[in-house]
Image (cartoon, rainbow, N blue to C red):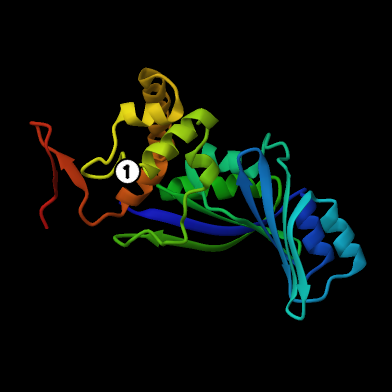
């Protein structure tokens, strides 16, 4: 099975793209994390007062450094409405978005992975209908390892997992529950949290189920190019294909 990677840039109504257009030396990288956006803003040039003012309006500044190497700022801002967003369109065409979005010189740069070349072609044709788009590359990924740069977005992996479920999962992981042999039991973990064993187990199982469900598309991506995919025989035993 072949995967297909497409990289392209578009001009879209977006304040980050517009800032990059007004300041050509600037590069803005954008990640979606839960209910916020994290932006990394880098420029090799000393920033002007106008640029610093614009950056200050983007959101809460988490880190800022200005020295002889230029400007480096990390900000957190409220998540803009994703209604009819490009990322939603990617999903409609079964294309996996690869963060971050990069804003540079008035363009938004995206990379997506498609499981079928026709999906990638259909997505690009649809985007060409209502915006400027420049396709930078289209590459088939066949019989090779998935690049390490294709990392699963954290917010997608932990989507819809509650704080209590996350806490239960972290406690189990850090206490050696998933090691072989296990270093603790559900009852011992529950005693640490001062909740009933059944309550703790419910939080843990729900967290596990949601995490595996969210990771499903990335599991499919990894196994799609595996040189030794698994098969299941009629007896239900998984085994590797013979070379």
Q: Where does residue 229 sit, x and y in percent of width and height?
A: 22, 49
Tell which of 204 and 188 is nearer to you.
Answer: 188
Judge whether residue 134 can be spotted in this image.
yes
Q: Which residue ends up furthest to the bottom in the rendered image?
A: 68
Judge whether residue 93 can be spotted in this image.
no
Q: Where does residue 236 sit, x and y in percent of width and height?
A: 12, 32
Image quarter of residue 230: top left
Tell which of 183 and 157 is nearer to you.
Answer: 183
Above or below, comparing residue 168 to residue 174 in the picture: above
Above or below, comparing residue 49 to residue 201 in the picture: below
Residue at x-position 41% and y-position 62%: 147
Total marks placed = 1
* For residue 106, side relative to residue 240 (left or right): right
* For residue 64, side relative to residue 101 (left or right): right
Dot 1: what SS? loop
Image quarter of residue 172: top left
* For residue 153, side relative to residue 49 (left or right): left
Residue at x-position 43% and y-position 50%: 117
* For residue 99, side relative to residue 55 (left or right): left
Q: Where does residue 227 sit, x and y in percent of width and height?
A: 23, 57
Q: Which residue is mark 1?
A: 176
Q: Which residue ends up furthest to the right in the rendered image?
A: 49
Q: Where does residue 58 sit, x and y in percent of width and height?
A: 80, 51
Tell which of 223 and 213 is nearer to you.
Answer: 213
Query: Crowding near pointer 1: few (<14 within 10 Å), some, many (20+)?
Result: some
Q: Quadrant of the C terminus?
A: bottom left
Residue at x-position 41% and y-position 40%: 215
Image quarter of residue 18: bottom right
Residue at x-position 14% and y-position 50%: 241
């Amino acid at each position: 099975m072949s995967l297909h990677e497409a990289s392209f840039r578009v001009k879209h109504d977006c304040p980050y793209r517009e800032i990059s257009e007004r300041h050509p030396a600037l590069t803005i990288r954008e990640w979606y994390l839960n209910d916020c956006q994290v932006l990394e803003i880098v420029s090799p040039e000393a920033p002007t007062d106008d640029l610093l003012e614009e950056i200050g309006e983007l959101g809460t500044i988490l880190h800022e450094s200005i020295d002889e190497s230029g400007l480096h700022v990390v900000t957190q801002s409220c998540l803009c409405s994703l209604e009819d967003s490009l990322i939603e369109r990617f999903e409609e065409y079964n294309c996996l978005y690869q963060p971050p979005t990069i804003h540079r010189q008035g363009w938004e740069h995206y990379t997506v992975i498609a499981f079928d070349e026709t999906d990638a072609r259909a997505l690009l044709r649809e985007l060409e209908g209502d915006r400027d788009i420049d396709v930078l590359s289209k590459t088939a990924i066949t019989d090779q390892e998935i690049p390490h740069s294709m990392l699963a977005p954290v917010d997608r992996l932990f989507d819809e997992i509650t704080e209590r479920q996350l806490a239960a999962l972290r406690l189990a992981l850090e206490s050696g529950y998933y090691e072989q042999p296990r270093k603790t039991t559900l009852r011992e973990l529950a005693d640490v949290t001062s909740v009933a064993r059944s309550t703790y187990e419910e939080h843990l199982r729900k967290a596990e189920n949601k995490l595996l469900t969210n990771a499903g598309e990335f599991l499919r991506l990894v196994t799609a190019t595996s040189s030794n995919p698994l098969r299941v025989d009629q007896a239900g035993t998984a085994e590797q294909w013979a070379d």
